[in-house]
């Protein structure tokens, strides 16, 4: 295999070798995907879309987050489930490219959106008198479109770099889905340095967003602690803690996956870490946001009651 033009498929890392464990993996991922991801994110998307009380900037961004979460988990989990069900490891070359494109697009757009949501919380708490002006509907749409558009361009750039590199080492990837670092390991030339450089720039951009989020929350917490009433402080913390929990989960799992020492790497650990950052956040984000949000819980209850009434 002297060039990637001869590569017709990749071999993904399997979760198990025995048939019983493969079926267990399929059932486990089926439960996570259908219940925790599809149903929960779908309910939030429907509730925010249908309930006019939730037509505010915070819930508009939450709707976008749920769409991105749904897309992120859909880009990796169904293929892994199908491979376990049919006892195969293969994914076509074009399928692998599509998987890389959508995963990078959606995960990067989600990170940019989480940064914007930190700004939304900052304006709401630190500049409440200017909130209506700074976060009007037009500004919110532009911000969301910027997150989606930046993620798209970012993904196109990575795809163009990664899949122009000759691959000749092998076609076996050390992960249960196609990701750029694993594909770069198959390179047979120094051309991978170009993509590696782009990854360094990406980490720098991610670090800038991280600093922005941290500084936003430093300002938020300093403002909240100056609120005289305990009820006011509780309300302000309730607005911010779900977003902070989602950001912490997203960053901690991704940082451990990509910045852990090479000495800690092993196929089993890499699989677990990949599940933590690619499957767990999209599945639990709806639970985090709905746990302490009375308005969202009320909207979800109304939606579920409406569905049940129509079925009866």
Image (cartoon, rainbow, N blue to C red):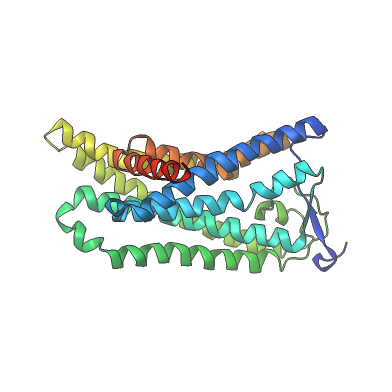
Q: From the viewer's side, name the closer residue of 108 and 164.
A: 108
In this view of the protein, can residue 260 be seen by the observer? no
Above or below 291: residue 190: below
Residue located 78% across and 55% down the image: 10
Q: From the viewer's side, name the closer residue of 30 and 113.
A: 30
Residue located 53% across and 66% down the image: 152
Q: Quadrant of the N terminus?
A: bottom right
Residue located 67% across and 52% down the image: 181
Q: Where is residue 23 drawn, in percent x and y? A: 75, 35
Q: Is residue 154 left or right of residue 97?
A: left
Q: Where is residue 14 drawn, in percent x and y? A: 76, 41
- How many tags in the picture? 0
The residue positioned farthest toward the front in the image shown: 312
The residue positioned farthest toward the left in the image shown: 228
Q: Is residue 160 left or right of residue 171?
A: left
Q: Where is residue 239 drawn, in percent x and y? A: 28, 42
Q: Where is residue 295 drawn, in percent x and y? A: 29, 42
Above or below 94: residue 248: above
Location of residue 270 (image quadrant): top right
């Amino acid at each position: 295999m002297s060039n990637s033009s001869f590569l017709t498929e990749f071999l993904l890392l399997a979760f198990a070798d025995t048939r019983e464990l493969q079926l267990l993996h399929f059932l486990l991922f089926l439960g996570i995907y259908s219940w925790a991801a599809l149903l929960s994110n779908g309910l939030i998307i429907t509730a925010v879309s249908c309930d006019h009380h939730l037509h505010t900037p915070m819930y508009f961004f939450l709707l976008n987050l749920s769409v991105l979460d749904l897309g992120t988990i859909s880009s990796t989990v169904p293929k892994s489930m199908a491979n376990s069900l049919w006892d195969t490891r293969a994914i076509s070359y074009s399928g692998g490219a599509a998987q890389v494109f959508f995963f990078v697009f959606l995960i990067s757009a989600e990170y940019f959106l989480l940064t914007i949501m930190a700004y939304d919380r900052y304006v709401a708490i630190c500049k409440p008198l200017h909130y209506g002006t700074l976060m009007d509907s037009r500004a919110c749409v532009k911000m969301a479109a910027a997150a989606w558009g930046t993620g798209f361009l970012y993904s196109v750039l990575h795809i163009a770099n990664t899949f122009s590199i000759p691959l000749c080492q092998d076609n076996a990837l050390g992960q249960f889905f196609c990701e750029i670092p694993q594909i770069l390991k198959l390179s047979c030339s120094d051309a991978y340095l170009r993509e590696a450089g782009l990854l360094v720039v990406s980490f720098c951009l991610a670090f800038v967003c991280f600093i922005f989020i941290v500084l936003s929350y430093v300002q938020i917490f300093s403002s909240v602690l100056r609120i005289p009433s305990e009820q006011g402080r509780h309300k302000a913390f309730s607005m911010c803690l779900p977003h902070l929990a989602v950001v912490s989960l997203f960053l901690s799992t991704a940082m451990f996956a990509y910045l852990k020492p090479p000495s800690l790497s092993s196929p089993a650990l890499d699989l677990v870490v990949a599940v933590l950052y690619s499957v767990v956040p999209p599945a639990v984000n709806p639970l985090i946001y709905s746990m302490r949000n009375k308005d969202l819980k009320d909207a979800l209850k109304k939606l579920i009651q409406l569905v049940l009434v129509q079925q009866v």
